[in-house]
Image (tube, coloured by chain):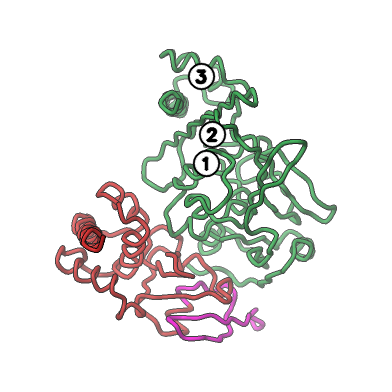
Amino acid sequence: MKAAAFDYARPASGDEAVALLAAGTGMAKALGGGQSLGPMMNLRLAQPDSLVDLRAIAELRGCRRDGTGGMETVLIGACTTHADIEDGRFDDPSRGFLPRVAAGIAYRAVRNRGTVGGSLAHADPAADWVNAMAVAGADILVQGPAGRRTVAAAGWLQGAFTPALAEDEIVLGVRLAQWSAAARWSYYKFNRKTGEFAEAIAAFVVDPARDLCRGLIGALDGPPHVIADARGLLAALQAGDPAAADAELVAAGLPPGSYEHHIHRAALQRAAAQLKGNA
Amino acid sequence: MNDKPTSPLALTVNGRKVSAVVEPRTHLADFLREQQLLTGTNIGCEQGVCGACTVLVDGVPTRSCITWAVSCQGAEVRTIESFDEDETMAELRAAFTAEHALQCGYCTPGMLATARDIVTRLPQADEARIRLELSGNLCRCTGYVGLVRAIGRVLEARRQRNLAEA
């Protein structure tokens, strides 16, 4: 099918983009790579009156190292593509975590055009960046009519396809702290077919230098379940006690005995084993 | 609708500068087929799943059915029609023939765009990697065996040549 008619604008600045979105009174959509919005519009699941293409905004492209709150951080521009990250065409603060996540998104042709900011704004709970950025402890930078603000990635999803982003706001980028040389991570994604959205995602990020051991149960019906202190869970899973995960799985809304409980538990076990292997 | 929104578009298609006026809702595949009469690009699912419409935009494989033509302002687009003189594509075409990598041919333009990306970007790719990379291009005729062999054959020939040159 073909998309319904819409107007198109390609602003050169974030301010201009925000003004265009505000003028659209809810019927204007920001466009990144369009790799989710494109199919939705072709299927007429989405019929915005206008698209505001963010790809010409210089500030949203590229990636730079900066310092925030006394920490060494890296800001990844919203229009950075998944392929940019997969190929390492950015200053990676995550010791290979982000490139590994990027390489598992959809297919190469989609990764060549799809953007980090677009994926976050689309907010599919089964997509990779909403989950990976949550377990990475990233911050998402947003600009709106009232100025700029920062949202912790762990709190980004309000529900399925509902990000903490107003209709007249745009994603500027994602900020991550530099991980230490001792940092380790694992990311396990369960798909029935290569390149499709995940049925279950589990991940661990451990960075002793920052006293951090975070876990994630993702690809849920709603927001991902972040386990702020996963030391006990990780130790139990690595010691071969999968039942230790049940409390967190129930807290993530996965009732015992259900198919979802089972596959998310298997994903957690495999992520824990992968982390051990990465030691 | 009497006042269809339109936008000007200037880009390069197969090495030729093109200026056009498009409806923003026109995706790149329709623009190439209907306005540029480049019908080598096939449209399958129109939702980014099947890969039949894969073309090169600024040198990299892109789904033309979920990329708005208007968003390709200033881009360099290459379709299957532009590869007659391309040595890598000639090698792939010969390998596709030798290994029976197509039957009906509908997926072939997209397959060749992806295959060229595999052999140029991933010189060390093995069979498992070729299969992984091909997961975004659907072929309902061949069962992929011929496709994987054809791409593997070109990769191996390129590796041998590099060894010979080294």
Q: Residue at x 83, y 56 (%)?
A: A145
Residue visible at 41% across and 14% down?
A240
**Mark 1 burial class by Cα count in 10 Å: few <14, some 14-19, many 20+:** many
Along the line of sight, the residue nearer the viewer: A177 or B161: B161
B77 and A32: which one is in front? B77
Please tell me the numbered disc located at residue A126.
1
* Amino acid carrying mark 3 in the image: Leu
In which quarter of the view is residue B36 placed?
Answer: bottom left
Q: Secondary structure at mark 2?
A: strand
Question: Whole-percent x and y of residue A49?
Answer: 67, 67
Which three-letter amino acid code belongs to the residue tagged 2? Gly
- Local secondary structure at mark 3: helix
What residue is shown at x 49% (from left), y 54% (from top)?
A83
- Image position of B158 with respect to A93: above or below: below
Q: CA distance from mark 3 to mark 2?
A: 16 Å
Which residue, given by chain and number where applicable, does mark 2 sit on? A218
Q: Earlier in the sequence, mark 2 or mark 1?
A: 1
Chain ID of residue with mark 2? A
Q: Does A57 appear above or below B36?
A: above
Please provide the residue range marked out in magenta: B1-30
Q: Which chain is red?
A: B
- Please tell me the numbered disc located at residue A147: none
Quarter holding residue B69: bottom right
A18 or B130: which is nearer to us? B130
Task: Give x and y (percent) for residue A28.
Answer: 70, 63
- Is the residue under label 1 in contact with that under label 2 (CB below 8 Å)? yes
In which chain is the residue bearing label 1? A
